[in-house]
Amino acid sequence: MVKKDKSRRTEILEKAAILFHKKGYSATSVRNIAQEMKMESASLYNHIKSKQEILQAILLPIAHRYTKGIQEISNSPLTSIQQLERIIADQIRITIENIDGVSLIPNEWVHLEKTKERDALKEFLDLRNLYEKEFKKVFKKCIKEGYLRKVNVDIAVFSILSTLRWLYSWYSKNQKINPLVLETELINNLIGGLKKT
Amino acid sequence: MVKKDKSRRTEILEKAAILFHKKGYSATSVRNIAQEMKMESASLYNHIKSKQEILQAILLPIAHRYTKGIQEISNSPLTSIQQLERIIADQIRITIENIDGVSLIPNEWVHLEKTKERDALKEFLDLRNLYEKEFKKVFKKCIKEGYLRKVNVDIAVFSILSTLRWLYSWYSKNQKINPLVLETELINNLIGGLKKT
DNA sequence: GTATAAAACTAACGCTTGTTAGTTAAATAA
DNA sequence: TTATTTAACTAACAAGCGTTAGTTTTATAC
């Protein structure tokens, strides 16, 4: 048995992600998604439970992926500064792999709801908090072990994460760039700084 | 004659900005805004032309403010690196002054439309392009004059602007911080970098 | 105090929304 | 071939949307 074709459901999630990316969750109607799938809106409901479920099915796996990634790295035997670099690289990779899905992470999560099946909003925010906590832990270790200057951790981490959150937007318009170049350049800027020494 | 009270219209724009910030333009209904104003939705139309006009009245003045700011600075007799620092400081100040309005800049501009009165979408994008162009110009000058390393300008500028775009989000949750501390710390991180030398 | 203007109200409009019910067509398994 | 499942369809729903019309109340000017 060969690997199953991309399921109809997956197609829907992909099309929806593109539309959500372009217009936002609220401004995208179920009929818009159906049109993109070349079917009637009612037919979508053979594959999905609700519009809300689509959003959850896009966002939550990504949020889990982020958290899993940072935990594996921070538990690895790398030095703290190597860990920090790997964490940044991991985010860049996730973004490039799934631009439209990732594009919803910074803003559209506000439309997650508590449904019968799961409290998606809480689930998302818990994962995000966990991620941020882990990130700060590694960052502090980098300072303590003398790799980084003694800066305000909250401000510095917010600044780095901002760049990574906006990467999807920049990368959408600059896909020609080599991902590896982007990776090294970005890590260099974020950690090493821009000033001539 | 004493200075006129904050007009009812301005109140509406402020309330709307808060709601747009919280839920997004599309998910915010005219009735939501009216409720916040403690009036009926129809009464809003004594003060505004349409929901779309509200969005335009919030976003476009801010966009103009940004562009005016960067142009004044880049035409000043400061050195290139001083200009860069001032541009960053200016953005930080605009953000702090009007958090809810600024919060709409990164994403909600997609809901701007061409109306009878003005092509708000084009107007916004033109301003944004102008801003980015000006920013890159100053940045390149900083490199040319030896203040900054020879980095990829597109990537570095995107990275700095990302941090500034996300500032509203971070600052909403950390208002206790002294704006001036934030300013110096952020400029230092963004330009000077984090690594110990 | 009366006339004018500003800003609220009630009621309703046409349209779009997410979703359900019931039915038919296509694909798969026996 | 027949039975079963999957996935499409048409039609419709109740609720909410932005907005308009017309009216009444409140504030301002003479």
Image: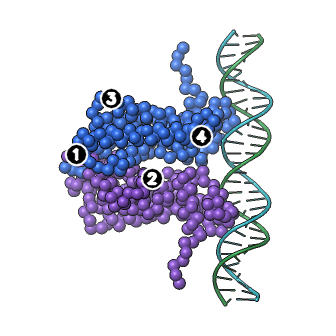
Chain colours: A blue, B purple, C cyan, D green
**Looking at the image, is mark 4 or mark 3 earlier in the sequence?**
3
**To which residue does mark 3 refer?**
A76
A51 or A130, which is in the foreground? A130
Helix, strand or loop at mark 1: loop
A72 or A21, which is in the foreground? A72
Three-letter amino acid code of the residue under disc 1: Lys
**To which residue does mark 1 refer?**
B196
On screen, residue B152 above or below A34:
below
B75 or A71, which is in the foreground? A71
Pointer 1 with pointer 3, Cβ within 8 A: no
Identity of the residue drawn at 31% across and 42% down: A140
**To which residue does mark 2 refer?**
B173
How packed mark 3 is, by other alpha carbons closer than 10 Å (few <14, some 14-19, many 20 or more), is few
* Residue D11 image offset from top left, x and y in percent: 79, 38
On screen, residue C1 above or below B40:
below
Both marks 4 and 2 on one chain: no
Both marks 1 and 2 on one chain: yes
Helix, strand or loop at mark 3: loop
How packed mark 2 is, by other alpha carbons closer than 10 Å (few <14, some 14-19, many 20 or more), is few
Identity of the residue drawn at 35% across and 33% down: A74
- Let me know if residue B197 appears in the view: yes
Nearer the observer: mark 1 or 2; the answer is 2
Q: Quadrant of residue B137?
A: bottom left
Nearer the observer: mark 1 or 4; the answer is 4
Three-letter amino acid code of the residue under disc 2: Lys
How packed mark 1 is, by other alpha carbons closer than 10 Å (few <14, some 14-19, many 20 or more), is few
Three-letter amino acid code of the residue under disc 4: Lys
Pointer 1 with pointer 4, Cβ within 8 A: no
* Measured Cα–Cα span from mark 4 to mark 3: 35 Å
Three-letter amino acid code of the residue under disc 3: Ser
**To which residue does mark 4 refer?**
A114
Identity of the residue drawn at 31% across and 55% down: B185
